[in-house]
Amino acid sequence: MDFISVIEDKKSGRELSKEQLTYFANAAARHTVPDYQLSALLMAIRLQGMTPRETADLTLAMANSGDMLTPDVGGVALDKHSTGGVGDTTTLVLAPLVAACGGKVLKMSGRGLGHTGGTLDKLESIPGMSVNIDEQRFLEIVRTVGCAVAGQTKELAPADKTLYALRDVTATVDSIPLIASSILSKKFASGAGAIVLDVKTGSGSLMGSLEKSIDLAKTMVEIGTHAGRNIRAVISGMDEPLGSHVGNALEVKEAIDVLSGRVRGPLLDVSLFLGCQMLLTGGLVSSEEEAMLKLRRALKSGAGLAKLKEMIAAQGGDAAVCDDVSLLPQAPVITDIIADRDGYLGGMDTTRLGLVGRNMGAGRVRKEDPIDPAVGFVMKKRIGDRVKKGDVLCTLHARTEESAAEARDGVLGALRLQDAPCPPAPLILALVTPEGVRRF
Ligand code: URA
Ligand code: CA
């Protein structure tokens, strides 16, 4: 097949055949077509779009471009995937809670990307914790503990690896068919039996608008259902960081605080809602009410926290952090940002806040950069909160005074204080299942 004609077809708005899309995925995985031609096709797809049939064929071709796992975890392998956010620590809260309710959570996570954090980087802030475990051990932990979170064990969807890197540098990330095929190809390859997607919307999200986020969710639920997976998607708000803590050890601390019952709020609420959907897709409960009851019981009894301890210990980490969060890495410079006027917190640029954390050292500017596990910040106000002059808006945890000063300007520049009162930001906006869209 001639790759130029594939580009020509998409450029002219013609539908690509399954053979053409398979050729594209394999060429990306094996580097048999130069990057500039792959990139040209990505841009043509970004501008012309794809039909549901094309998106489904591309997804399956990308999944089949590498290893396809069929994990035996002693039950339905449950997976949850977020499109990426700031202070988005739901995995660390809900994987242990769902495991405590009898679920088998097999979670292959990623590193931080751009302004968003990555679960693997967060877990590595726990002393001794390993996220590079071999497949046999990974499955054994899922079977015995009920949850494990680690990096990819095999070469899953290598086509996505090539295409994602090209999209990042050719302004072709924001395409529904390309995002859907990227996310689902990896889920199909990892052998997930039941998939819950957390599609973020708002100022810190990939898609921005609610309608686009719902379109993305509908596309993914349709493809997943067509491929025989139990799948549903939650649309959740990312107009502000979900938890109050942003940074690797800080987010682990917040997950422990939530699981130990010390802290409530949006991170817990969204984690419970997602956990509910996981128990439902896995067929472990028959109603949302039953799921919520089980999850709340696991929280209250401490069974969720006990599962997190078991998982940390099984992956070589120091589970004592769950009883004493001061064992997590601590930043040397801790300083408050104080409000210099009265008002209400009207909104924030969450992507910018995520970048402040990244620039403090919580994330990477280049792929090979090291992470500073201790740094980040804790938001003390949420959208809609009344602010009085002298109130603490945010506490910085920095490596140096200089970094704290830079972060201070960044955080202040991302917050919008206003005179008029305003409502809190919405948390759960919609649920997309094969049956349709439920808006809240
Ligand atoms: N996450 C992915 O894995 N792929 C995308 O394209 C976007 C978010
Ligand atoms: Ca994430």
Image: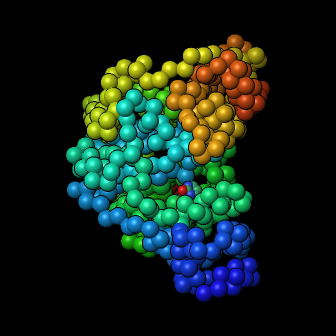
Q: State which quarter of the image contains the N terminus.
A: bottom right
Residue at image coords 69%, 62%: 172
Which percent across, then down, holds residue 404?
A: 67, 21
Q: Quadrant of ligand 1?
A: bottom right
Which percent across, then down, holds residue 233?
A: 48, 57
Q: Among all residues in the image, which is located at the extreme top?
A: 390
Residue at image coords 47%, 36%: 122
For this rendering, which residue is in front, 193 or 170?
170
Q: Is residue 402 above or below residue 431?
A: above
Residue at image coords 66%, 33%: 359
In the picture provided, is 12 more to the left or to the right than 142? right
For this rendering, which residue is in front, 208 or 289?
208
Residue at image coords 41%, 26%: 257
In the picture provided, is 439 more to the left or to the right than 402? left
Q: Is residue 395 above or below residue 211?
A: above
For this rendering, which residue is in front, 69 or 300?
69
For this rendering, which residue is in front, 336 or 119?
119
Which percent across, then down, holds residue 23?
A: 56, 79
Q: Is residue 86 above or below residue 335?
A: below
Q: Is residue 113 above or below residue 181?
A: above
- Place residue 11 in its image quadrant: bottom right
In the picture provided, is 310 more to the left or to the right than 425? left
Which percent across, then down, holds residue 235?
A: 54, 52
Q: Is residue 387 visible?
A: no
